Image: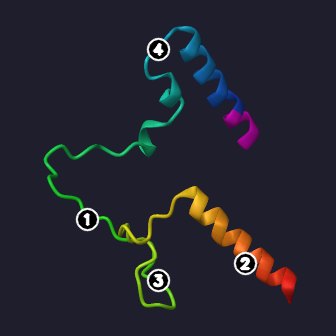
Amino acid sequence: MAELEEYISNLITIIAYERDDPNAAISSVPLEKLTPKEFDAREMQIDAPTEQMTDAGEDPLSLDEEGIVDSKTLYKNFMAHVEQDNKK
């Protein structure tokens, strides 16, 4: 039964694309699963999924200038670690 529902959902989407429906991508989503948008809501609180800290006690997701590393520096650090491991 689940496969039949999936095939019908795909059929609805394909037909919507053929008709150049601007909402074709969401045409097969049942209305019961769509939630109404709250246009009056001004502020939204988004909680971080985790509150992990690194060993150094820093926030791993902070975007301080010290945390941003260009690709060349990152590669040099990686190669230095590889060379250290090869010397052991």
- Quarter holding the C terminus? bottom right
Distance from Cα at disc 2 to Cα at disc 4: 54 Å
SS for tag 4? Answer: loop
Check residue 52 in the rendering and tell me which mark sits there, or answer none: 3
- Which badge, 2 or 1, is on the more N-terminal residue? 1
Label 4 packing within 10 angstroms: few (<14), some (14-19), many (20+):
few
Among the 4 quarters of the image, the one containing residue 59: bottom left
Q: Specify start and end residues of the magenta stretch as a single range.
A: 2-6
Seen in the picture, residue 62 relative to 19 is either above or below; the reply is below
Seen in the picture, residue 73 relative to 1 is either above or below; the reply is below
Q: Closer to the camera, 64 or 32?
A: 64
Q: Which numbered mark, 1 or 3, is in the foreground of this view?
A: 3
- List the residue tagged with mark 2: 81
Q: Position of residue 60 (x, y in %)?
A: 46, 76
Label 2 packing within 10 angstroms: few (<14), some (14-19), many (20+):
few
Type of the residue with mark 2: His
- List the residue tagged with mark 4: 21
For image coordinates 29% across by 43% down, the residue present is 36
Type of the residue with mark 4: Asp
- Which badge, 4 or 3, is on the more N-terminal residue? 4
Is the C-beta separation of discs 4 and 3 under 8 Å? no
For image coordinates 35% across by 69% down, the residue present is 64
- Which badge, 2 or 4, is on the more N-terminal residue? 4
Q: Which numbered mark, 2 or 3, is in the foreground of this view?
A: 2
Distance from Cα at disc 1 to Cα at disc 4: 34 Å
SS for tag 2? Answer: helix
- Quarter holding the N terminus? top right
